[in-house]
Image (cartoon, helix red, strand yellow):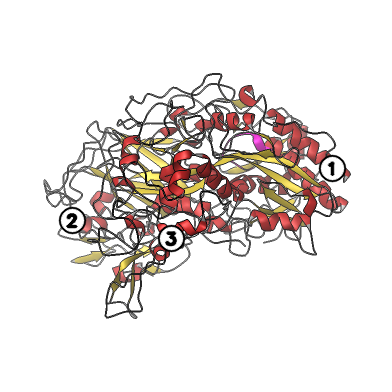
C-alpha cells in the first residue's frame, strides 16, 4: 500500500480512538478529560461496554437475560470480561457435564450489520467432552429448522475462514483451529442468583488469521470487525423436546442459533501507522515497557514523524549496546538497572519512562463456576517453592507416584495441597483436583526484574531459609538439585531448571521421555506467560505416549477443564491487565500483603533511594515501607551522549512524549495502558531534565535527589493518605478484583470482602495492607483501568473551522505491519522472542 501524506513534525498531535477511527488532537488545545459515565457505561477506558438482552425463544424464554461485554472497541489479542444477570441457575446433567441453563460463547468474523453467519464462528473443536453440544454437528431430527443449505440426515455446519478455505467435516477443522488452540467457551455457568461471569480470550489477526480481526484489507478502510456471540441454552433441545438431564444439540443448530446475542467487536488495526521509508530509531530492552511502547509508537509516528522500533532484549545485552555501541547498535535501551559509568565510553543519560511491576498472575476459578477467585495471597516462601520445582507434580511420573525424582516425601503434590497456601487463603473455594495441575509459569530469559524477584526472596527470612535447604513448618524442603545454585546467597537473574528427572511412560518407546521442562516449559516472554495462564494451558506435554500418532509422540497437554482452572505464572502488570488475570497480593518487608496497584507502586517508589548511579532508583524489596508493593520497578530510557545530534534529538522527543502525553492512563494510541502507574511528579521532571541533557549531548549535571519518587504519595500516581492499599491488582482481577482501584489523586475503594483468618503457621506475619481473602466472589467488578483512576478517555474537541481544515488530511499510514511477522515490534505478544 502506498504511504499517505504526513503532517509536519512541528505540529504536535495526539492520536486518540473514537468510534473505531483515529483522530488527531492538536497539543496546543487543552485536553478535555472527564470521569467515566455512570449507569451501564461500565468500561471507563473507552466507554465501549455494551449490554444486550436475550429474547423470548421458541422453546425457552431468555428475555430476562442481560449480557454485558466490558470492552467492544480498541481490542487486540487480550482477555475481555463477559458478565450476565437474569439467567436461570445452571443444573448439572446426569453425567455431571453441561446439563441445562448455561451460555456458549464464541468469536466470529464478518462485517454484516446484523452479525456473523454461523459458518464464520470458531466453535466445535473442544477437547474431552463427548456430546454434540460442543460440535458443529446438527441433524434434521434434532432441529426441524435447519437450513436447506446443509445436507439432509447428518448435517455439519461448515467453518469458513476469513483468510480463505472451508472445513466441511470435523477432521478438516483441525486445519484451522484445534482443541489445543480454540478459544471457544462451550459451557459457562450461571449461579443461583441468575448471574455469572467469565473472561473470554479474544484473538486479533496476528494470532488468528482465520478470524482476521483488525486486519486492514485495503488502504483507507477501517480494520475488519469481529463478533462475540453468546448462545444461551435452556431446558429444551433444538426441536423443542425437554432435556431434563442435559441438552445435547449444538448451539449452531438453527433453532438454537436464533437465540444468539451478538456483540460487534472493533479491533485496533494490525498494520503500522509508520510510512514506508521513514527513518527508524531502534530501541531495545526490558519487556516491562513493552505494552507502553506498543501504545506510544503509532502516536510518535504520526505526531512527531518519529518511527521508533522496539525489540525486546535482555537488559544486560541492551546495556552493553549503549555502553559500547558498534555499527547497527540500538541507540536507546530500556532498563531497570543503570548502565555502569565505568563500562561506558561516554556519559549515559537515564530518563524514567514507565512505572510498573512484576506480578504473579493467576487464573483460578471458584469451585463449579466460571468466575475467577477475586484474590489470593502469596508469601515469598510459597513463590520460592514454585520456582524451584519443589512440589511433586513439578516432576514427571505416574499419577500414582507419591514421590517423584529426588524430592522429599513430605513435599506436597502441588500448591493446592500445601498447608501454608491453604492457611494464607483460608475460605477460598477453588477446585482441588486430585490429579496434577500445571506448574508455575516462568520466562526463559534473564532480566532486571527477575533479579529483583530473587532479591525479594533472599530478603525474606522464611524464603531465604527455605532456599538454604531448611524445611518449612510442615516438613517441605527445596528440590535438592537447586541447592547447587546457592539461591539463598547468590545473585540470580533467571530461572534455571537443573532437575534431571526423566520418566519413560511406555517401555515400548524408550526414546520418548518426559522431563520437568517438557512438562512445564518456559514461556517465551512475560506476556506469553500471561496468555498461557489465561488459556489455562502451558503448552507442555504429558507423561504419556500417544502410540496412535505417526510417529508415536508424547501427548500434548489439553487446556484445563472449564470451571476447574487453577494456573499461575510470572508476568508483568500490563500483561496481567491485558489478559484479565488476577494478581496475587504479595507479602512485603513491612509484613503486609499488598496488591500491585498505582497506589502501592507509588508508595514503593517514594521510599526508594538512589543506587550506584545517581538518578537511578534502587528497587530494594527489603525496604520496610507500609503499603508498598515489593516488586515495583521503574524503567529508564538509557542513551549515550556520544550519539549523533539527530539521534539524540529523536530519542529526546520519545522521552518527552513518554513522560508527558504518554502518561495519560487509558486504552488507545498514545495513552498509558492498564498495568502502569503514572510517573510521579519527580520522575516526570527527571525525565524532562534527562531529555534536555541528551539533546545537548551532556550528562545530567544536577543530582535528581536520593529518592526521585519522593513526595509521590500525593501526586499523579493517586496514592491515598491512608495506610491501606486497594484490593484489586493494577489492571484488575477477572472477578472483580479491580473494584479496589484508585482514582487519580484519590484514595482506594474499600474492599467489601469479609474478613478471614489468613496467617500461616511459620510464615512472616504482620498486618495486611488489604483486607483478607474472602470466600465471597466479588461479581460485577469494575474494568481493568478503573485501578488507574477515573481519568480515562480523551474526548474529541470541536475545533474552529480553520483548525479543523488543517487537520482534514489523513494521518494514519498503514504501510508495513505492526503485528506482522516481518517486524519484531510486538513479536513477544505472539509468543515468539523478538531477539
> Residue 553, position in %: x, y?
34, 75
Question: Could you say which disc has been placed on residue 498 in the image?
Answer: none
In the picture of the structure, the residue carrying the numbered disc 3 is 481
Q: Is residue 96 magenta?
A: no
Where does the C terminus fall, quadrant-wise? bottom right
| Mark 2 nearby-residue class (10 Å; few <14, some 14–19, many ≥20) | some
Residue 668 falls within the magenta-colored stretch: yes
Task: Point out the stretch of residues depicted in magenta.
Answer: 662-669
Q: Residues within 10 Å of mark 1 (few under 14, many from 20)?
A: some
Q: Which residue is mark 2?
A: 144
**Foreground: 38 or 321?**
321
Whether residue 495 is situated above or below residue 66 in the rendered picture: below
Helix, strand or loop status at disc 1: loop
Q: Position of residue 793 (x, y in %)?
A: 58, 32
Where does residue 631 sit, x and y in percent of width and height?
A: 54, 40
Position of 819 with respect to 615 (left or right) is left
Task: Report the number of numbered marks.
Answer: 3
Q: Could you tell which of marks 2 and 1 lies nearer the N-terminus?
A: 2
- Mark 3 secondary-structure assignment: helix
Q: Quadrant of the N terminus?
A: bottom right
Q: Are marks 3 and 2 in contact (CB under 8 Å)?
A: no
Q: Nearer the viewer, mark 2 or mark 1?
A: 1
Question: Circle 1 is placed at which residue position?
Answer: 699
Q: Quadrant of residue 670 in the image?
A: top right
* Distance from the alpha carbon under mark 2 to that under mark 1: 78 Å
Amino acid at each position: 500500500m502506498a504511504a499517505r501524506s504526513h503532517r509536519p513534525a512541528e505540529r504536535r498531535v495526539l492520536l486518540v480512538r473514537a468510534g473505531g477511527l483515529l483522530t488527531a488532537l492538536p497539543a496546543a488545545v487543552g485536553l478535555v478529560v472527564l470521569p467515566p459515565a455512570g449507569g451501564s457505561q461500565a468500561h471507563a477506558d473507552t466507554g465501549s461496554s455494551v449490554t444486550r438482552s436475550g429474547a423470548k425463544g421458541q422453546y425457552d424464554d431468555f428475555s430476562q437475560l442481560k449480557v454485558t461485554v466490558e470492552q467492544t472497541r480498541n481490542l487486540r489479542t487480550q482477555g475481555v470480561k463477559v458478565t450476565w444477570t437474569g439467567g436461570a441457575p445452571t443444573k448439572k446433567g446426569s453425567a455431571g457435564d453441561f446439563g441445562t441453563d448455561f451460555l456458549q460463547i464464541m468469536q466470529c468474523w464478518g462485517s454484516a450489520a446484523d452479525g456473523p453467519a454461523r459458518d464464520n464462528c470458531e466453535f466445535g473443536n473442544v477437547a474431552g467432552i463427548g456430546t454434540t453440544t460442543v460440535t458443529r454437528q446438527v441433524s434434521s431430527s434434532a432441529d426441524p429448522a435447519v437450513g436447506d443449505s446443509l445436507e439432509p440426515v447428518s448435517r455439519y455446519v461448515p467453518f469458513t475462514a476469513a483468510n480463505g478455505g472451508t472445513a466441511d467435516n470435523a477432521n478438516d477443522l483441525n486445519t484451522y483451529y484445534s482443541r489445543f488452540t480454540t478459544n471457544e467457551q462451550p459451557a459457562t455457568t450461571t449461579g443461583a442468583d441468575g448471574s455469572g461471569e467469565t473472561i473470554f480470550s479474544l484473538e486479533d489477526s496476528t494470532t488468528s488469521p482465520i478470524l482476521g480481526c483488525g486486519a486492514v484489507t485495503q488502504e483507507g478502510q477501517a480494520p475488519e470487525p469481529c463478533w462475540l456471540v453468546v448462545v444461551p441454552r435452556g431446558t429444551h433441545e433444538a426441536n423443542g423436546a425437554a432435556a431434563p438431564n442435559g441438552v445435547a444439540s449444538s448451539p449452531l443448530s438453527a433453532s438454537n442459533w436464533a437465540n444468539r446475542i451478538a456483540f460487534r467487536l472493533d479491533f485496533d488495526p494490525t498494520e503500522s501507522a509508520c510510512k514506508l521509508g521513514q527513518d527508524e530509531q531502534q530501541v531495545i530492552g526490558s519487556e516491562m515497557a513493552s505494552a507502553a511502547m506498543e501504545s506510544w509508537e503509532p502516536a510518535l509516528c504520526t505526531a512527531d514523524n518519529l518511527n521508533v522500533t522496539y525489540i525486546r532484549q535482555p537488559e544486560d545485552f541492551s546495556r552493553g549496546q549503549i555502553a559500547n555501541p558498534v555499527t547497527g547498535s540500538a541507540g536507546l535501551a530500556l532498563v531497570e538497572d543503570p548502565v555502569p559509568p565505568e563500562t561506558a565510553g561516554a556519559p549515559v543519560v537515564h530518563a524514567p519512562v514507565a512505572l510498573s511491576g512484576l506480578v504473579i498472575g493467576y487464573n483460578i476459578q471458584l469451585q463449579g463456576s466460571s468466575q475467577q477467585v477475586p484474590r489470593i495471597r502469596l508469601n515469598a516462601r510459597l513463590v520460592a517453592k514454585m520456582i524451584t520445582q519443589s512440589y511433586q507434580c513439578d516432576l514427571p511420573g505416574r499419577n500414582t507416584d507419591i514421590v517423584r525424582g529426588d524430592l522429599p516425601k513430605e513435599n506436597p503434590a502441588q500448591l493446592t495441597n500445601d498447608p501454608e497456601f491453604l492457611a494464607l487463603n483460608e475460605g477460598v473455594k477453588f477446585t482441588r483436583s486430585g490429579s496434577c495441575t500445571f506448574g508455575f509459569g516462568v520466562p526463559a530469559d534473564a532480566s532486571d526484574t527477575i533479579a529483583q524477584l530473587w532479591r525479594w526472596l533472599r530478603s525474606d527470612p522464611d524464603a531465604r531459609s527455605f532456599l538454604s535447604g531448611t524445611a518449612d513448618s510442615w516438613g517441605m524442603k527445596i528440590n535438592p538439585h537447586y541447592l547447587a545454585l546457592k539461591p539463598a546467597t547468590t545473585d540470580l537473574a533467571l530461572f534455571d531448571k537443573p532437575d534431571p528427572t526423566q520418566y519413560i511412560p511406555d517401555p515400548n518407546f524408550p526414546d520418548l521421555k518426559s522431563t520437568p521442562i517438557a512438562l512445564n516449559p518456559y514461556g517465551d516472554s512475560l506476556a506469553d506467560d500471561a496468555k498461557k495462564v489465561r488459556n489455562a494451558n502451558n503448552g507442555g506435554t504429558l507423561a504419556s505416549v500417544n502410540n496412535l500418532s505417526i510417529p508415536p509422540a508424547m501427548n500434548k497437554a489439553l487446556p484445563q477443564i472449564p470451571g476447574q482452572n487453577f494456573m499461575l505464572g510470572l508476568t508483568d502488570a500490563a500483561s496481567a491487565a491485558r489478559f484479565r488475570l488476577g494478581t496475587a497480593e504479595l507479602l512485603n518487608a513491612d509484613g503486609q500483603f499488598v496488591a500491585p496497584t498505582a497506589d502501592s507502586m507509588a508508595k514503593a517508589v517514594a521510599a526508594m533511594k538512589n543506587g550506584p548511579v545517581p538518578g537511578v532508583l534502587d528497587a530494594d524489596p527489603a525496604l520496610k515501607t507500609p503499603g508498598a508493593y515489593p516488586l515495583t520497578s521503574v524503567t529508564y530510557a538509557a542513551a549515550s551522549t556520544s550519539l549523533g545530534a539527530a539521534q539524540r534529538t529523536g530519542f529526546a522527543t520519545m522521552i518527552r512524549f513518554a513522560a508527558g502525553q504518554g502518561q495519560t492512563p487509558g486504552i488507545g494510541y498514545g495513552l498509558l495502558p492498564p498495568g502502569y502507574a503514572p510517573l510521579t511528579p519527580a520522575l516526570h521532571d527527571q525525565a524532562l531534565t534527562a531529555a534536555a541533557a541528551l539533546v545537548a549531548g551532556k550528562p545530567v549535571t544536577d543530582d535528581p535527589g536520593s529518592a526521585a519518587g519522593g513526595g509521590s504519595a500525593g501526586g499523579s500516581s493517586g496514592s491515598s493518605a491512608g495506610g491501606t492499599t486497594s484490593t484489586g491488582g493494577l489492571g484488575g482481577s477477572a472477578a472483580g478484583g479491580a473494584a479496589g482501584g484508585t482514582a487519580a489523586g484519590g484514595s482506594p475503594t474499600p474492599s467489601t470482602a469479609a474478613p478471614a483468618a489468613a496467617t500461616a503457621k511459620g510464615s512472616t506475619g504482620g498486618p495486611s495492607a488489604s483486607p483478607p481473602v474472602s470466600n465471597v466472589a466479588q461479581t460485577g467488578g469494575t474494568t481493568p483501568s478503573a485501578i488507574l483512576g477515573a481519568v480515562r478517555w480523551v474526548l474529541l474537541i470541536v475545533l474552529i473551522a480553520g483548525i479543523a481544515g488543517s487537520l482534514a488530511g489523513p494521518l494514519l499510514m498503514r504501510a508495513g505491519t505492526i503485528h506482522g511477522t516481518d517486524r519484531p515490534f510486538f513479536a513477544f505478544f505472539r509468543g515468539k522472542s523478538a531477539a
